[in-house]
Image (cartoon, rainbow, N blue to C red):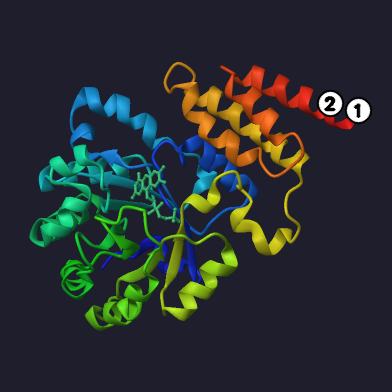
């Protein structure tokens, strides 16, 4: 089993979750600067798309990263083993530290291809995809991100099926596909998962198990990893408006409003520099509410920010807010 960078991480491992149109290269670079997690993932990218010349050009934008983000894992989705092998090889060429296969996405368009969460209903294909990704990935580790089941919790069969294929790590979002994100995560369902992984291990190592769902901060991540005997925890939505999230220990103090707004401006400027003419500026707007909340005048500031169309305007709106607040 190739475990690569996973082997070198201190336990519990705290990972940043892949989130399409959120954890893009601009936000990840900001996170790497203000509070670096143990490992980061790209947004998910179509394996089929990467195998066509036209698709590859477009999708490689989603595979941009900066060395400060390392270790960085590229997440792929797909249902064709040949394409998975080819795209995993491309991920190696691009210099990533790992390849991850998405087996949890509930998006209908993705499930229709037999990919994402649909793979929970097709463990044989899931195993084939892991084997194919491993062939393509060579010396870098292959991991899987999935859920506890499709309609109900089927961990007792789904997890062994994945473990048989020996991925380096499995991240388990503690909800079923049917539950989407509508109910609290069932962390109890993850109890014993890491122990089972050890049983399936070989002298060359065993699959690491990380839990995911509703974790808001680093202390909670550590508490969950310990309570459920996991190798680590992955955090997604907790990062919204808080690139300092993984820096809890060193920082102690919560970031001030001034600091938040300064980093928001920095984030927008970087986003524009990287994606101008490529990605819509409006994608950035979901971050505005997250950065600008919980202080006097936050609502008015958010309204003004929502009306902006470029970084320069965001800067001006923030400056105006500061002027009116210090008067
Ligand atoms: C906006 C958004 C986009 C997401 N995109 C992806 C993705 O590309 N790949 C993936 O595996 N999971 C994706 N997820 C799921 C998250 O990685 C994570 O499993 C989920 O949000 C639960 O963790 P949390 O409660 O810590 O946010 C996404 C979630 C959100 C909210």
Mark 1: few/some/many CA within 10 Å (<14, 14-19, 20+): few
Q: Position of residue 284 (x, y in %)?
A: 52, 30
Identity of the residue drawn at 64% across and 51% down: 244
Q: Are marks 1 and 2 in contact (CB under 8 Å)?
A: yes
**Image check: 1 left or right of 120?**
right
Q: Residue at x 24, y 26 (%)?
A: 55
Query: Residue 327's mark?
Result: 1
The vertical placement of 61 against 246, above or below, is above
Mark 2, residue position: 324
Q: What residue is shown at x 47% (from left), y 28% (from top)?
A: 283
Looking at the rendered image, the quarter that the N terminus falls into is: bottom left
Q: Quadrant of the C terminus?
A: top right
Residue 33 figure quarter: top right
Q: Is residue 228 left or right of residue 57?
A: right
Q: Nearer the viewer, residue 145 or 167?
A: 145
Q: Of helix, strand and loop, which one carries label 1?
A: loop
Relative side of 152 to 66, left or right = left
Q: Position of residue 277 (x, y in %)?
A: 45, 16
Label 1, label 2: how many angstroms apart (C-alpha)?
Answer: 5 Å
The answer to whether mark 1 is within 8 Å of ligand 1 is no
Q: Is residue 202 above or below residue 282?
A: below
Q: Is residue 78 left or right of residue 219?
A: left
Q: Residue 309: x percent and y percent?
A: 56, 17
Q: Place residue 144 in its image quadrant.
A: bottom left
Q: What residue occupies the far right of the structure in this picture?
A: 327
Is 228 situated above or below 135? below
From this view, report whether residue 233 is shown above or below residue 89. below
Residue 265 quadrant? top right
Near-viewer residue (8 or 322): 322
Residue 177: mark in rendering = none
């Amino acid at each position: 089993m190739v475990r690569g960078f996973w082997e070198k991480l201190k336990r519990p491992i705290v990972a940043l979750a892949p989130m399409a149109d959120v954890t893009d290269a601009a936000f990840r670079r900001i996170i790497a600067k203000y509070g670096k997690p143990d490992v980061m993932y790209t947004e998910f990218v179509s394996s089929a798309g990467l195998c066509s010349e036209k698709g590859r050009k477009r999708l490689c934008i989603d595979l941009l990263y900066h060395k400060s983000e390392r270790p960085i894992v590229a997440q792929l989705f797909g249902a064709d083993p040949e394409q998975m092998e080819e795209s995993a090889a491309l991920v190696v060429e691009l210099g990533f530290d790992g390849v991850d296969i998405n087996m949890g996405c509930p998006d209908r368009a993705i499930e229709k291809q037999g990919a994402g969460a649909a793979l929970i209903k097709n463990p044989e294909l899931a195993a084939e995809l892991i084997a194919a990704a491993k062939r393509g990935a060579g010396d870098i580790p292959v991991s899987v991100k999935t859920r506890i089941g499709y309609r109900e919790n089927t961990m007792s069969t789904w997890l062994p099926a994945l473990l048989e294929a020996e991925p380096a790590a499995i991240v388990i979002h503690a909800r079923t596909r049917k539950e989407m994100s509508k109910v609290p995560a069932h962390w109890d369902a993850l109890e014993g998962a890491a122990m089972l992984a050890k049983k399936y291990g070989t002298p060359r190592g065993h699959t690491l198990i990380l839990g995911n769902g509703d974790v808001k901060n680093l202390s909670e991540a550590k508490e969950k990893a310990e309570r459920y005997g996991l190798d680590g925890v992955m955090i997604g939505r907790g990062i919204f408006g808080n690139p300092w999230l993984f820096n809890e220990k060193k920082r102690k103090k919560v970031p001030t409003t001034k600091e938040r707004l300064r980093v928001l401006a920095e984030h927008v400027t970087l986003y524009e520099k990287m994606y101008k003419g490529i990605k819509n500026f409006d994608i950035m707007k979901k971050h505005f509410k997250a950065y600008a909340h919980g202080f006097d005048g936050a609502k008015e500031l958010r309204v003004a920010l929502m009306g902006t169309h470029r970084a320069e305007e965001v800067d001006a709106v923030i400056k105006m807010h500061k002027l009116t607040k210090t008067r």
